[in-house]
Image (tube, rainbow, N blue to C red):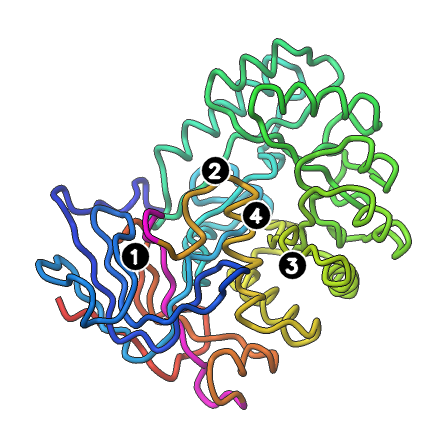
Amino acid sequence: MAHDAPSGPTGPTKLVIRNIGLLLSGDLEKPILDADTIVAENSRITAIGRLKDVDTEGATTLIDANGAAVTPGLIDSHVHPVAGDWTPRQSQLNWIDSFLHGGVTTMISAGEVHYPGRPRDVVGLKALAITAQRTFTNFRPGGVKIHAGAPVIEHEMVEEDFKELAAAGVKLLGEVGLGGVKDGPTARKMVGWARKYGIQSTIHTGGPSIPGSGLIDKDVVLEADTDVVGHINGGHTALPDSQIRCICEGCKRGLELVHNGNERSALYTLRIAKEMGDLNRVILGTDAPAGSGVQPLGILRMVSLLSSLGDLPAEVAFCLATGNTARMRALDCGIIEVGRTADFVIMDTAQHSAGRNLLESVQLGDLPGIGMTVIDGIVRTERSRNTPPATRVPFIVK
């Protein structure tokens, strides 16, 4: 297992990606951009347009997309990291690097709950959260950005604990319900404290997933009022349809759909969100590592599932895995627009797909082939070792 993130250039950088066949923005308002070239300088996007109209001089890295599509780097809104690129849940190394080969460039921790001997006392849980926040800031496997340090709340916590965590740089709460706090009134009070100090919250939704978790139903979810309704399609066991509808209609918080959940319930939630005109609330995660394993292509599979069986245009489905999550999580990636971080995936129709192009193939249920990932304007991987081979593959000119 690597111990450091890949070293990048030490001086000024200028990335140019040309010959883009399809540019997906990640923005629901305009999911497809009329452009064939992107320029990024010193890790941020500086120009998007036609090759003849943008300044490509002085490129330190020039990529020819070869007619393939470019999307924002995918964001996994729900993971459970532990230590480096290792998970004791499945005793597996390099799982984060495998997700990178599935197009994931950013991950959000929903709690470091698989840590062996995870402390439940207040001093210990705060120490673990601060340690996770620090270590994953310093260590980025393959360059993947991991927003970690998400304490699981316990009854003994007081407001000062949340103030202290925020001052130390903690910005997330682990899933409410994975610790001792499983009732609505206590959760609401602590979520309020977290929100007061700028800490975003997520709640476990559905039946128990691991020993120590428990049923969290609609009443607890609505009363707790967390910023994100974590795996509303269950992780793994989903609530009844009537309760899912109550949650969707009873709050305006994020609705998170995960790979390690009930697929039927995910499609049901998507249908409600569409009926309500609230697609902007839907975000995607994997809830991995979990008992069902590690899913490097989990986000791509969710995009394909929702598009093919949820009657959702593929370019819109990609927004749920990128721009929606970025806006909800206050990230500077996830959307291809000037000023944002230069995180990209270059992909194309998988070889021999029934679809005539990338979007049609995804809407038919196929996964795309990934030819390259870029994080902070730096090429991190070329042809994916996990996706099916792409029809068109980008190449580095210099």
- Measured from the top left, where is residue 144 in percent x and y? 39, 48
The circle drawn on residue 259 is 3
Highlighted range, magenta: 338-354
Q: Main secondary structure of the magenta part?
A: loop
What is the C-alpha distance between the residues marked 1 and 2?
Answer: 19 Å
Helix, strand or loop status at disc 4: strand
Location of residue 244 with respect to 50 vertically, above or below: above
Cα separation, mark 3 vs mark 1, equals 25 Å
* Residue indicated by mark 1: 380
Q: How far apart are labels 3 and 4 at the CA level? A: 11 Å
**Was residue 170 drawn as part of the magenta stretch in this picture?**
no
- Residue furthest to the left in view is 58
Q: Which mark is residue 147?
A: 2
Q: Is residue 88 above or below residue 16?
A: above
Q: Earlier in the sequence, mark 3 or mark 1?
A: 3
Q: Are marks 1 and 4 in contact (CB under 8 Å)?
A: no
What is the CA distance from the residue labelled 4 to the residue labelled 2? 10 Å
Estimate the x, y position of residue 150 in percent, counting from the top left. Answer: 57, 30
Identify the residue position indicated by label 4 in the image. Answer: 77
Q: Determine whether, in the image, residue 239 is placed left or right of residue 16.
A: right
